[in-house]
Amino acid sequence: MLDQPLGLRDLARHYDLAPSVETAEALGGIYQRMSRVVTPMDWAIHAPYVAAINQLKKERNAVILAHNYMTPQIYLGIADFVGDSLQLAVKATEVEADVIVQCGVHFMAETSKILNPAKTVLIPDMDAGCSLAESITPAGVAEMRRRYPGAPVVTYVNTSADVKAVSDICCTSSNAAQIVAALEADTVIMTPDQYLAQNVAKQVPHKRIVWWEGSCIVHEQYTAQDLREFREWNPGTRIIAHPECPPDVVAEADFSGSTKGIIDYVHAEKPEKAMLVTECSMASNIAGELPTVDFVGPCNMCPYMKKITLEKVLHSLHNMTGAVEVDPAIAADARVAVQRMIDMSRRLAA
Ligand code: 13P
Ligand code: SF4
């Protein structure tokens, strides 16, 4: 629910937001896609919000870009485009609508704004942060440059615009190893995710990778021991881990990749049982399109991603609040690092 009860009361004056079996049935096509994980009762509560948001998007000429960690009601109910961080950044360069509503965390909205300075980019909750983005400032990057003179700085997109602005190039979990391998330098600084850096170091052994000691509060909780115990208890489970997990966890997994990489892998392999070692909504979002896969095992919730709710999306789009602004000089420098990543990723994939 909205943090501000008054905001919700105000919305109810403009939209019929009472739980409704009729609206739930009218949007039955959308519900079909999430019926494995959302009960009909919950859908009757959420359907009026989905209907209101989808109508309002047309009136505002808005598109919703949603990360793979959004809840099924957002991911399957209102998103125009879903993806991992790289896909969302690339999509942001192609958007024609006047307004982008970023259903994800703040750095994702900032990236969309950096790539689209003329557009209105809304984030439904300004407090949707990220432990990685909070772990480093431009002073941290300067310190790394002092410690390793001449080494290029590869900065994960999970950072603020001012950190991107002082970096040489950005990366995401889907292109980090390729970007580091393609750089000419022998020593590469990776910020701020120590575990992503250590996982990349294993994939690019001929380079010296040094890192900032940030971590993701969701992925650092998994241990290799947990995975071993789970495998013993539930043999035959395919274990798939995000590269923000510690390297011994990734080593224990059958596959590691970005959120898009994980989705593609499960689609291609269709294992009988799959454990996604990542944020909880990932399995829920794809369960409907993979009816033969049993998603098993524990998952961890990202408290930042979960700040984005249907109520807050409607509130933000109705009132046009939560507009993300980036200082133009910082945005210009940050754009260079993000655009270099997009260009290099395209070149390396060609
Ligand atoms: P992806 O780029 O793999 O979607 O990861 C983003 C993220 O925040 C994972 O925690
Ligand atoms: Fe940040 Fe981790 Fe949440 Fe992703 S899952 S947004 S890296 S805290």
Image: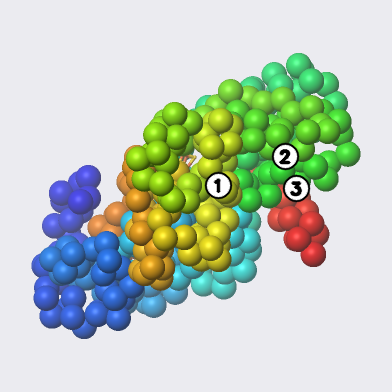
Secondary element type, mark 3: helix
User: Residue lying furthest top in this view?
Assistant: 147
Q: Which residue is mark 2?
A: 203
> Is residue 129 in view?
no
Q: Is residue 184 left or right of residue 83?
A: right
Total labels drawn: 3
Q: Amino acid at mark 3?
A: Gln
Of the two numbered discs 2 and 1 on the same chain, state the one appearing first in sequence.
Answer: 2
Residue 154 percent coordinates (x, y): 71, 37
Label 2: few (<14), some (14–19) or many (≥20) C-alpha neighbours in 10 Å: some
Foreground mark, 3 or 2? 2
Residue at 65% in and 30% down: 198
Secondary element type, mark 1: loop
Residue at 57% in and 48% down: 255
Label 3: few (<14), some (14–19) or many (≥20) C-alpha neighbours in 10 Å: some
Q: Is residue 41 above or below residue 331?
A: below
**What label does residue 292 carry, if any?**
none
Secondary element type, mark 2: helix
**What label does residue 254 carry, if any?**
1
Q: Amino acid at mark 1?
A: Asp
Quarter of the image for residue 38 reads: bottom left
